[in-house]
Image: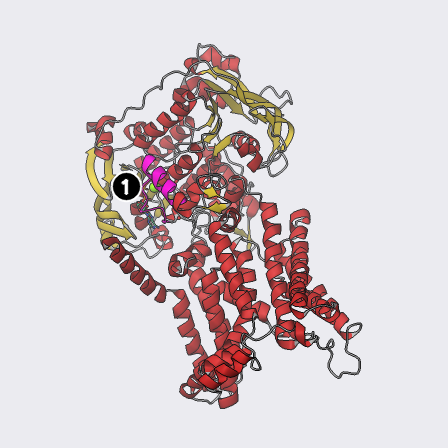
């Protein structure tokens, strides 16, 4: 009883400490910077911000936000598992693009019942993403090219290869769009509760046409559940499996992991495979769930891979943190678009805010360390991750 | 005598720990002041506060009568302080010379004068009798050499108040003696020196006064000339600790570790093990460790011991020769295979290799044990079993840590060492490689760990012990191998070993010379 109370109290204390920590402070400062930018553009921030919040959280807002959050969280979790293991996968974009391509090919060509095709398309996409990621890993482990570089460079062949296919062999004849033909109706990932289903109409009658919940069930598709399942799986793997345990330690001190008997080469390859598979899955879900065809440059144009990277950073690679900050970034984007519609503020403002959040966090986390370094301290100084864990204890999974 | 330094009522709290509790400390000009206390007593914290690395929660610092606030080490350095850190503060990717001169680089025509710096550092190292290669990269060096770099760096700055936090933990007695001569000369020259060590002999030989900390408080202040080792020990621990020669081993059993003609390269491609040596025979190192015996390796840091041990452990490739553990050839095997073949390993570098500072105590104590029951069941980690086991080890090895969830990066040096030892000694493998196993632990803990190591031997374990501490090797090992320039140059039965003979052999004297100087049988 008393220990429970004490535990409660430390939880409260930790929460308060976290709120005073770098993440919330950075978000507030970033919003303030955004306000200044809005004011410079000649618009009253006290009008613009409320319309941003309104746009993200009312009416169609929650549905849009969840829709956007799905791929962002998916990419962020793909990156978070890699970063947590100390594997700097910067090739998530290419892995996503190839996943989208492989899935599209399956959906366009494979006969059979829709659900089966969807599943096979997803598996093909995961395989494509995983293989591409593995290539980057092998370049590091066998030839010494750092993954940071090999994975980043492999984005380009992936992008141009899929672009070539979409422009030439796969292009829908006679269409003005540079895109493949539409995939069959039954290979599209359905909404949580499709509008034309019995459930859908029943819900509309009981909730009303404008109800936020109704809009969510109609506009958000099963990809969201898949991504949530992936996040749950990652939490499980991190906490409960020896491999997840090892990759966490390898990310914190590679030499320690090696010394403890962890086969670090295998770990890097395995991590890249998982990371690439998730990226590929996100790619196919975007095609089968929202575009219904592969449009030239569309997957790259979403910038989800890079938004996901920021989210993973903000979340310090913790899965729950990825959910929260992924939703936050999605809301920023959706709200930014709403603000543009209602107040004429460029939606790029939300990108400015996103970037500012990250820069501020990085500055807050590294500045003290950097100052210390310049005072001639190197070895044994708490690493950046050190501080992140110290401040983010609450979000710890 | 004038008071040079005065700390008044210094208090520092960390989450769950009161590290310093209203500590007063006065040090006079020209004094060598020893600071003692058990692991976690608060010595390093107090010195870090003095050096501006931490800010005190309460209390004040006075230097030559003037109150000072050091917001950072930079301020402290500017005020004439210098510090040798227990956990070295060196840039791993820079060379020795660059680390030493960092912040005070000399330039030639506007550019960093690397050659000049290297010459200068070589000259200082020569003068102080601490062998160093100024052009070597710091992350390639064994801990004993890093310790020399850290000391030279502080001496280079010519501070008026010099703080040394366990500078002798990995120095050989000869090196320590040279350092003491330097310190005495500096003190005679009017410098003020604060010296932290767990070695009572050093305190008695070197210091003018002693301050003993216990649980963050001053337990006693003594004048060295008017006290003795026993009184200091009592003040630290509240009991008597006598390190004595341990019971002799029984007859050793079958061979557990066998090296045949092993050669190993250093990072820069030079031969680190084998090939050299006084004999210069060109052959590699061969040795055997049998069940129920402790074989000691003595040597000055940088003579190939670290490379040899890393090669046995699987962290460094073996160029030629074979290594067998429990009869299995593991020359090309991975670390995991070697561990499965029956190896446990306490590495000398607890920070860079032995732990992950940002991970919690439970995780640090679990690595290597996490793929077998009770930590793993039906393929899944048993988190509660991990925590329970961590609690047991913390209890058994008396590790001073707020709890299993505390990140080990916050532990005091000696307590971090105990984490490594606890993890490796709880493997119950037939072979234990122990490299500087008691580095930085207090005398009570040394007594305990020596007991554990001999108990392991009597249980039938084979131990390969590498230590800079000759008294440790002499009291634990049955046979002592001396390494010099990558070769085993002598084997001495422990019964016939003494510090001066070993010292000569370690410095490169041939067994004949050593025998001539010191009667005794050498192989
Ligand atoms: N940065 C920190 N965060 C939290 N606790 C800390 C931190 N630094 C030290 N402590 C705690 O303060 C206490 C004193 O540590 P300190 O390093 O001063 O001990 P010490 O006397 O130097 O011990 P040792 O002989 O083992 O080096 C320990 O219990 C340690 O866990
Ligand atoms: Mg200490």
Instruction: Indicate whether A332 appears above or below B71.
Output: below
**Label 1 neighbour load within 10 Å: few <14, some 14-19, many 20+:** many
* Image coords of residue B407 (percent x, y): 39, 49
The verdict on residue A351 being magenta is: no
Disc 1 designates what residue? B41
The spot of residue B176 in percent (x, y) is: 39, 30
Could you tell me which quadrant the C terminus of chain A lies in?
bottom left
The chain identifier of the residue carrying mark 1 reads B
Ligand 1 sits in quadrant:
top left
- Image coordinates for residue B47, horizontal then vertical, percent: 31, 46
Residue A315 visible in the current orientation: no
Magenta stretch contains residue B390: yes
Q: State the image quarter where residue A273 is shown.
A: bottom right
Q: Residue at x 42, y 70 (%)?
A: A26
Q: Is residue B91 above or below residue A51?
A: above
Residue B196 placement (x, y as % from top left): 32, 37
Part of the protein shown in magenta: B386-406
Quadrant of the drawing holding the N terminus of chain A? bottom left
Q: Which residue is rendered at x = 75% and y = 84% of the image?
A: A176
Q: Is mark 1 within 8 Å of ligand 1?
A: yes
The one of A171 and B21 positioned closer to us in this rendering: A171
Color theme of the render: secondary structure
Q: Looking at the image, which is closer to me, B412 or B1?
A: B412
């Amino acid at each position: 009883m008393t220990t429970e109370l004490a535990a409660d109290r430390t939880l409260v204390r930790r929460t308060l400490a976290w709120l005073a920590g770098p993440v919330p402070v950075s978000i507030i400062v970033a919003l303030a910077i955004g306000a200044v930018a809005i004011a410079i553009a000649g618009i009253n921030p006290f009008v613009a911000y409320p319309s941003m919040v309104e746009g993200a959280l009312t009416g169609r807002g929650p549905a849009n936000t969840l829709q956007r959050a799905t791929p962002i969280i998916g990419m962020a979790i793909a990156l978070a598992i890699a970063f947590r293991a100390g594997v700097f996968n910067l090739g998530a974009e290419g892995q996503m693009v190839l996943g989208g391509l492989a899935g599209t090919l399956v959906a366009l060509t494979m006969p059979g019942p829709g659900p089966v095709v969807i599943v096979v398309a997803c598996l093909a996409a995961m395989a494509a993403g995983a293989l591409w990621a593995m290539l980057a890993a092998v370049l590091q482990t066998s030839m010494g090219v750092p993954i940071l570089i090999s994975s980043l460079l492999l984005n380009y062949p992936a992008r141009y290869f899929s672009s070539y296919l979409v422009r030439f062999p796969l292009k829908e004849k006679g269409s003005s769009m540079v895109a493949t033909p539409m995939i069959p109706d039954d290979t599209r990932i359905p909404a949580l509760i499709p509008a034309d289903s019995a459930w859908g109409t029943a819900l509309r009658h009981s909730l009303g046409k404008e109800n936020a919940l109704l809009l969510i069930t109609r506009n958000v598709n099963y990809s969201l559940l898949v991504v949530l399942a992936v996040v749950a799986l990652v939490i499980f793997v991190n906490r409960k499996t020896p491999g997840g345990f090892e990759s966490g330690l390898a990310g914190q001190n590679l030499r320690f992991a090696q010394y403890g008997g962890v086969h670090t080469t295998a770990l890097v390859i395995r991590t890249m495979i998982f990371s690439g598979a998730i990226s590929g899955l996100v790619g196919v879900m975007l095609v089968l769930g929202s575009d219904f065809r592969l449009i030239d440059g569309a997957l790259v144009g979403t910038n989800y891979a890079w938004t996901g990277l920021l989210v993973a950073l903000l979340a310090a690679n913790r899965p729950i943190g990825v959910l929260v900050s992924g939703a936050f970034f999605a809301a920023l984007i959706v709200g930014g678009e709403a603000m543009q519609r209602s107040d004429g503020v460029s939606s790029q403002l939300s990108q400015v805010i996103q970037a500012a959040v990250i820069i501020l966090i990085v500055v807050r986390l590294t500045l003290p360390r950097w100052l210390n370094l310049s005072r001639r301290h190197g070895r044994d100084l708490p690493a950046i991750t050190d501080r992140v864990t110290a401040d983010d204890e609450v979000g710890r999974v | 005598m004038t008071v040079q330094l005065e700390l008044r009522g210094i208090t520092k709290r960390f989450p769950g720990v009161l590290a310093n509790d209203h500590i007063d400390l006065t040090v006079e000009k020209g004094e060598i002041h020893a600071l003692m206390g058990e692991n976690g007593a608060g010595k390093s914290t107090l010195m870090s506060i003095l050096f501006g690395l931490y800010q005190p929660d309460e209390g004040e610092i006075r230097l030559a009568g003037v109150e000072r606030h050091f917001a950072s080490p930079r301020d402290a350095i500017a005020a004439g302080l210098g510090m040798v850190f227990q956990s070295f503060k060196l840039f791993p990717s820079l060379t020795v010379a660059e680390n030493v001169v960092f912040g005070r680089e000399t330039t030639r025509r506007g550019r960093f004068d690397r050659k000049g710096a290297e010459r200068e550092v070589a000259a200082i190292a020569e003068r102080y009798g601490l062998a160093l290669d100024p052009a070597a990269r710091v992350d390639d060096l064994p801990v004993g050499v890093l310790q020399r770099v850290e000391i030279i760096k502080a001496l280079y700055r010519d501070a008026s108040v010099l703080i040394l936090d366990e500078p002798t933990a990995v120095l050989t007695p000869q090196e320590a003696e040279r350092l003491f001569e330097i310190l005495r000369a500096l003190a005679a020259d009017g410098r003020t020196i604060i010296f932290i060590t767990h070695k009572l002999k050093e305190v008695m030989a070197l210091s003018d006064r002693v301050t003993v900390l216990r649980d963050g408080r001053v337990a006693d202040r003594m004048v060295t000339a008017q006290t003795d080792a026993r009184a200091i020990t009592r003040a630290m621990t509240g009991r008597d600790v006598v390190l004595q020669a341990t019971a002799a081993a029984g007859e050793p059993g079958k061979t557990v570790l066998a090296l045949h003609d092993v050669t190993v390269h250093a990072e820069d491609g030079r031969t680190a093990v084998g090939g050299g040596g006084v004999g210069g025979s060109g052959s590699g190192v061969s040795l055997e460790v049998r069940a129920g015996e402790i074989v000691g390796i003595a040597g000055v840091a940088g003579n190939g011991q670290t490379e040899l041990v890393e090669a046995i452990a699987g962290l460094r490739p073996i160029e030629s020769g074979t290594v067998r553990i429990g009869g299995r050839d593991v020359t090309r095997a991975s670390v995991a295979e070697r561990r499965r073949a029956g190896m446990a390993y306490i590495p000398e570098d607890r920070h860079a290799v032995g732990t992950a500072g940002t991970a919690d105590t439970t995780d640090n104590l679990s690595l290597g044990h996490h793929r077998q029951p009770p930590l793993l069941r039906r393929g899944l980690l048993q988190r509660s079993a991990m925590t329970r086991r961590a609690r047991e080890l913390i209890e058994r090895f008396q590790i001073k840590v707020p709890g299993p969830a505390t990140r080990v990066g916050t532990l005091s040096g000696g307590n971090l060492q105990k984490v490594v030892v606890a993890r490796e000694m709880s493997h119950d493998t037939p072979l234990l490689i122990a490299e500087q196993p008691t580095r930085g632990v207090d005398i009570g803990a040394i007594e305990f760990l020596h007991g554990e190591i001999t108990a392991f031997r009597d249980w039938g374990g084979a131990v390969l012990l590498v230590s800079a501490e000759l008294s440790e090797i002499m009291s634990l090992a049955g046979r002592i191998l001396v390494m010099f320039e990558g070769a085993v140059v002598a084997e001495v039965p422990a019964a016939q070993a003494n510090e001066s003979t070993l010292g000569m052999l370690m410095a490169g004297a041939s067994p004949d010379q050593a025998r001539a100087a010191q009667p005794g049988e050498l192989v």
